[in-house]
Amino acid sequence: MFTLIFATVAALVLYREWNTSYAELLIYATPGFFAFGLFSLPAGWLADRWSRDGMMAVFFIGIGLAAVVTGFSQTPMQIGMGLFAVGMFAAIYHPVGLTIVTTQWHNTGMRIAVNGVWGNLGVASAALITGFLIDFSSWRMAFIAPGIFALLVGIAYISLRWSSIRTERRHAANTTDDKAEAKGQPELRGVIIRIFIIVFLTTAMGSMIFQATTFALPKIFEERLHGLAMQLSIWIDAAPAAGHDDLATVIGWLAFVVFATASVAQLLVGRMLDRYGPRPVFMTVAAFQLVFFSLMPGLTDMLALGAALGFMLGAFGQIPINDYMVGKIAQGTYKARIYAVRFVVGFTVLAASLPLIAWVYQNWGFDVLFRILAGISAGILLVVIMLPKQLPAAVEQIENEQPNKFEY
């Protein structure tokens, strides 16, 4: 949510208030997304060496303070610095939170999927809450109010998990690397290396798709769903009867509906991962994206809304798959660091794709961007074909031999 507040603010307000083009504003968000990726590695290392719960407390407090400070920005440079701080603290969640989620329990696919649905509700809420606060307060409050909320959550987290924060390091010191046996088998090691290469390649390509769809969707909807938004604003009386100059709330609602509906795809994907494994599920999701990105150019209003829902189902449905494979293969005290490497790759590409989005939009518009994303989806499909039909049996057997404290 916090990394996407600026996407709606830039698309609907700042380009007018600061007399700066949308494409130019995107440049100031780029360092924050690089921080989102690069700081994943030290976050994972600290979590493994110090405390996972302690790092989650730092996440809530840090991102809350950074958002509040960003809300007081007076220039694009200042907001860029604030977004860098937001990205730095946001980097903590994925390697640390997913390590917590995938440790000790079975049904890995479904647990990652449920976690992902909550994450995507944050993506959806960014457009909805930001649009609401823009209309009824200001773009500054769109940063400040969620920041204060995060601070309160951080205080609650510390109070609830304090005993775990104090004792986790001692328990981690007694944990053995339960993948030692698997690493000693050359054939199995080769398969695992191939899987990780595919994970990193598809992470890079998938991150570009995810960034383009989630960050640009408010702007896409402003252009492609303007007529639909005007009709809805009249119907719900969300804007003055004459003029309809500010439709931020309506556009935010439309983005929220698409994001929230598409996030449900992760539950289906999680269930299918536990039942059929990653290869057939990944191929289906990639094909889904390819079809709807290819259909999107030239569409407006209801047809554009339907196509956008289609490619967002694919974009969100892809999220649990790589995390599932990492969670199945990466075990022991190094899990947070392995997750961190995956997210360094993903979020670095995610940050680098912002200038690409701005350049493509400024020169050719969104139709060319959709065709590029269709090509990336085709590339993902070709790479995923090289996955083994099942994850290495020895790895899964070793994992299933671990104590099962809880059942999902």
Image: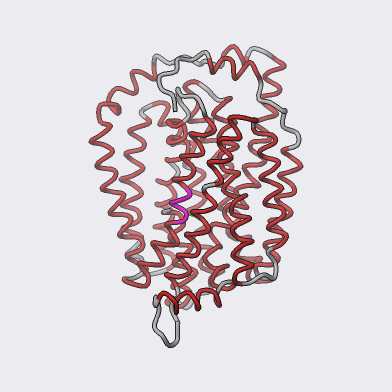
Colouring convention used in this rendered image of the protein: secondary structure
Image point (56%, 69%), residue name: 23
122 within the magenta span: yes
The residue sitting at the left extreme is 159
163 within the magenta span: no
Image point (48%, 47%), residue name: 36
Main SS of the magenta part reads helix
Q: Nearer the viewer, residue 20 or 123?
A: 123
Q: Nearer the viewer, residue 213 or 316?
A: 316
- Going by the image, does 190 lie left or right of 127? right
Q: Is residue 119 above or below residue 19?
A: above
The magenta segment is 120-124
- Going by the image, does 296 lie left or right of 164? right
Q: Nearer the viewer, residue 290 or 13?
A: 290
Residue 290 screen position, x and y as percent = 71, 53
The residue sitting at the bottom extreme is 242
Residue 7 screen position, x and y as percent = 48, 62
Image point (39%, 75%), residue name: 238
- Going by the image, does 304 lie left or right of 86? right
Question: Which quadrant of the figure has residue 367?
Answer: bottom right
Residue 217 screen position, x and y as percent = 55, 63
Name the quarter where the C terminus is drawn. top left
